[in-house]
Image (cartoon, rainbow, N blue to C red):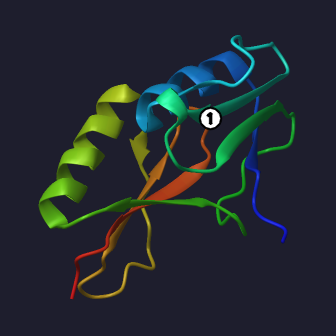
């Protein structure tokens, strides 16, 4: 059966993106080092989860990306703590006009501008 091996995102500065996502997700470079144009990050200590590949890209970041990461938090308190932690690592809040009332997600952008969401999975 086929499965997701890695999720691929573009980055203008692969090393900067790798540093952010490694700290954000507790991931490490699969092959031990980060190249200027490519890296595959995997869960540290052989933990579960798909790989995250970062490839050099000169394509502009999309304001409304068709594909993005959803990071799951167990509840609202964990979501708030993770948003605070990710902001301290260099993420930025995105001014998102389409939040529904009582939204269970927060939209952030990594230092490269790639958008992702932090989801409160215990919501509702």
**Residue 1, placed above or below residue 45:** below
Position of 118 with respect to 53 (left or right) is left
Quadrant the C terminus occupies: bottom left
Identify the residue at image location x=44%, y=52%. Answer: 108
Position of 28 with respect to 36 (left or right) is left
Identify the residue at image location x=23%, y=84%. Answer: 102
Identify the residue at image location x=54%, y=34%. Answer: 46
Quadrant the N terminus occupies: bottom right
Q: Nearer the viewer, residue 99 or 24?
A: 24
Question: Where in the figure is residue 103, as x and y percent of width and height?
Answer: 30, 80
**Residue 70, placed above or below residue 31:** below
Number of residues whose C-alpha sits closer than 10 Å to that of mark 1, classed few (under 14), some (14–19) or many (20 or more): many
Disc 1 marks which residue?
A: 42
Identify the residue at image location x=74%, y=34%. Answer: 54
Position of 102 with respect to 55 (left or right) is left
Question: Where in the figure is residue 10, as x and y percent of width and height?
Answer: 78, 40
């Amino acid at each position: 059966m086929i499965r997701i091996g890695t999720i691929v995102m573009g980055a203008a500065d692969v090393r900067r993106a790798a540093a952010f996502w490694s700290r954000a997700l507790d991931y490490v470079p699969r092959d031990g080092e980060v190249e200027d144009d490519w890296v595959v990050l995997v869960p540290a200590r052989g933990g579960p989860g798909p790989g995250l590949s970062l490839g050099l890209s000169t394509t502009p970041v999309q304001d409304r990306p068709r594909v993005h990461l959803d990071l799951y938090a167990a509840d609202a308190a964990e979501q708030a703590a993770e948003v605070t932690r990710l902001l301290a690592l260099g993420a930025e809040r995105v001014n998102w006009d389409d939040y529904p009332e009582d939204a269970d997600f927060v939209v952030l952008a990594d230092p490269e501008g790639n958008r992702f969401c932090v989801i409160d999975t215990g919501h509702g």
